[in-house]
Amino acid sequence: MYNAIQRIASMPRIPLNQDQVLRVKGLAKEIADRIQNFIDSHSSVSTERTILRLFGIDGTNDQEIPLPNRIVDLLREQNLLEQGISFPFSAACLKSRRDTQTTAEMIDRGEIILGDYDGISISKIREQVSVFAAGAIELLDSTRQRKQRKREQFPMGAQPWKYLIVATGNIFEDRTQAISAVHCGADVIAVIRTTAQSLLDHVPYGATTEGWGGTMATQENFRIMRKSLDEASEQAGRYVMLTNYSSGLCMAEIAACAAIEDLDMLLNDSMYGILFRDINMQRTFIDQYFSRMICARAKIVINTGEDNYLTTSDAIEQAHTVTASQLINEAMARNALITDEIMGLGHAFEISPNVPNAFLYELAHAQLARELFPNAPLKYMPPTKHKSTDIFFSHSMDTLFNLASVTTGQGIHLAGILSEAIHTPLMQERFKALQSINYVFGVARELGDEIEWKEDGFIVNRAKTVLGETEKMLEEILELGGLRKAIEAGKFANIIRTFEGGKGFDGVFLKAENYSNPVMEILSKEGVIV
């Protein structure tokens, strides 16, 4: 297999000030650590529902309420949620003498009362908690091991991985498009999630055939697509990765569903939901942490959303905000045990084509990201903001994007589609996108190895400028009082959010002294799994 990391290490580098690189990394770590203090003392309803899913609970009741939601809501009604769901649910299982799914159904029907510990010793409950937690960890380990075996049988394609979206709204139509894309060379299939699912405070259940701008993210939909891609991988002779979204009000829950069904990547950002979906800041910080711990153990690549900043901000003037966010996302991901090889930090090719030397700016930004995060499979997004209904010009823009990506050694390359500004792309348009990528990646595969960056040239000076502005921004964030205050001041994407505003705030709570999340405790204690 083409070894992207070895190639990146041998590529000519921009002469950045390495002391400055260490300083910006240190500033980002301090910002992340301040937020971590808050995360460690709080939990949320969605984090507790995730524990139930990892304990094996799924499905809905006769009112179509997901059982994890129902169980957590019942405990909350008794004002007992602050201790966490693990202990009272384990006690309920001891009372029922049944498996977790059956016990959840009995609780829903009122046959067992959560928080009733009569006749059960505390030691027995703790023992049961340990058994369930060990089962959850085994579940996360098994998905990692299954994926590893698949990749050993069918080697993965060369980076940059060709990432193609499907978004029909119907999982079965998505499946057809995905299989077609695999045979045209796609390395990653991303099932775009239906519009506004991030605002749902539950995970929908079952296979779905209707969506708006995408398809519902459900565990059954994950299973359907993963099965089809496994079959397509065997036919193509290479492993094809599957991506979905875990942003929004159910970050950790969807991460758990994704792990169960062997997904390879998840859109997972520490700030995206806050800024672009008005998800409460506290809720997002808490849920992204647990979701990333799950991804770390299951070896699911996280993709961050810095590209979205450039949809509301100028890509030249605000380039440093992208870099600052990447550094903060990296630091927060490290706190959640995410390792470099599964850290898909995001950025985008979004400078106006009318700007003189726009391509040089793009190369500078892409090369800066590559050097700041040399071992990460950076996720590079195509031009969208400045596309029009002129499909031929759009195709030209995408071709330059393809060239920038392979030249600077990006990791995850999202295919630019010529009809981006017109409609949901047709299969033929996706084919043309992959055809262009295959051509450019083939003829320019080692172009970056041949380039030496002019020491006092445009690209080097631009990269140094952005790094300097990034350092200044990170210092300002700390002077303001940290990430919370920076977001409240609109430092990212010119969007202002408040600490107690936004959706999902009512689902956040302070942990009691006897709070327990045994899955998180094991993950924290055992550390990084290689």
Image (tube, rainbow, N blue to C red):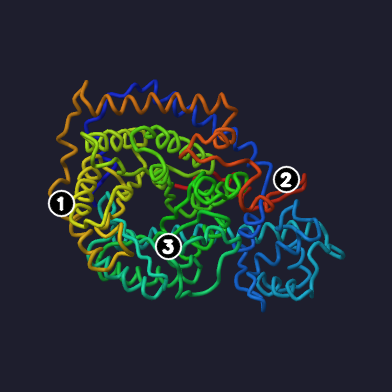
Q: Which residue is mark 1?
A: 442
As displayed, is residue 357 above or below residue 208?
above
Amino acid at pointer 2: Leu
Q: Nearer the viewer, residue 426 or 293?
A: 426
Looking at the image, do the residues carrying marks 3 and 1 touch, with CB atoms under 8 Å apart?
no
The mark nearer the N terminus, 2 or 1, is: 1
Cα–Cα gap, marks 2 and 1: 54 Å
Name which residue lies at 33% across and 64% down: 424
Amino acid at pointer 3: Arg
Q: Position of residue 205 (x, y in %)?
A: 55, 72
Foreground mark, 3 or 1?
A: 1
Q: Which residue is mark 2?
A: 510
Name which residue lies at 33% across and 25% down: 465
The mark nearer the N terminus, 3 or 2, is: 3
Cα–Cα gap, marks 3 and 2: 37 Å
Q: Which residue is mark 3?
A: 146
Q: Position of residue 148 (x, y in %)?
A: 39, 58
The image quadrant that residue 466 belongs to is: top left
**Which residue is at the far right?**
118
Q: How many marks overall?
A: 3
Q: Residues within 10 Å of mark 2 (few under 14, many from 20)?
A: some
Residue 525 visible: no
Q: Residues within 10 Å of mark 1 (few under 14, many from 20)?
A: few
Residue 335 visible: yes
Cα–Cα gap, marks 3 and 1: 31 Å
